[in-house]
Amino acid sequence: MIERKFVAEKLKEYQIQEFIAHTLKNVGHSHTKLQRTPVGDKVVIFASRPGLVVGRKGENIKKLTNTLKKKFNLENPQIEISEVASPNLDAQIVAERIASTIERFGIQKFKAIAHKALTDVIGAGALGIEIQISGKVPSQRAKSWRFYQGYLKKCGNIATEAVMRARAVAILKAGEIGVKVAIMGPNVHLPDDIEVKKPIVEVPKVEEKKIEAKAVEEKK
């Protein structure tokens, strides 16, 4: 019974996160966290543009609060908006930005859009980034394009914990275009990073004694 309760709570939390991500599309939404408090359920939304999330006079927050009450039966939900410090280092924000730009300017400019994202992310201090754009790009047959720059781990513990991955979808007339982004941030300590430290105890240098050579006259 306890296991089923935990699974049901996690499933409900996942559904709320997916619903908020779909509702706050194209406003710089990164991720959502849910916290249980004695007063009620606290929903923390991380976004790069909090003003668009809040809306004029808090209209968007009021609508989202009422929807969470009715659809997910949350008790007194309290929504808090937290601004993302570095949007160019957040994989979800970068993926949504690429998808929304493709929807705005069309698929013909997908290479310029991808290279612009590479420049912005590396300029923000990331060690590496990889972008995959899949779909009918740009012909009628489905293809997959890969753009990368810098250094990015593909396996090991660092690849699972230090590499941020995200997905987004661009909806066009020709069909859906999938966008995958993987970013390895600047504060990652790699196992092959070697730092040479100076010796703590310095060995005194031995002065060379000069030996004066004496000339010895040979007696004939």
Image: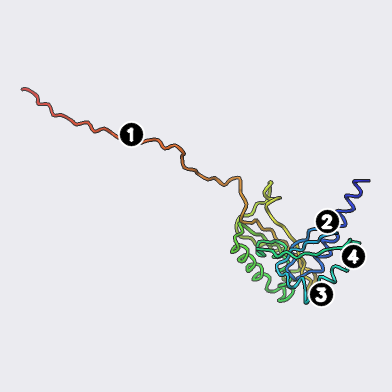
Marks 2 and 3, how far apart at CA: 24 Å
What label does residue 37 carry, if any? 2
**Residue ID for mark 3:** 59
First in sequence: mark 4 vs mark 1: 4
Distance CA(mark 3)–CA(mark 1): 80 Å
Q: 10 Å neighbourhood of mark 1: few (<14), some, or many (≥20)?
A: few
Q: Amino acid at mark 4?
A: Lys
Q: Residues within 10 Å of mark 3 (few under 14, many from 20)?
A: few
Disc on res. 86: none
Q: Amino acid at mark 2?
A: Thr
State the CA–CA distance, disc 2 to disc 1: 70 Å
Who comes first in sequence, dot 2 or dot 3?
Answer: 2
Pointer 1: what residue?
Answer: 206
Helix, strand or loop for disc 2 = loop
The amino acid type found where label 3 is placed reads Glu
Is label 2 in contact with label 1 (beta carbons under 8 Å)? no
Rounded to the nearest angstrom, the CA distance separating label 4 from label 2 is 16 Å
Look at label 1 and name its amino acid.
Answer: Val
Residue 44 versus residue 220 in the image, above or below: below
Report the residue at 13% width, 29% height from top. Answer: 215
Q: Earlier in the sequence, mark 3 or mark 1?
A: 3
Picture colour scheme: rainbow
What is the C-alpha distance between the residues marked 4 and 1? Answer: 81 Å
Taking 184 as reference, is 123 above or below it?
below
Dot placed on the residue nearer the N-terminal end, 4 or 2: 2
Whole-percent x, y for residue 68 in the image: 87, 65
Residue 18 % position (x, y): 83, 62
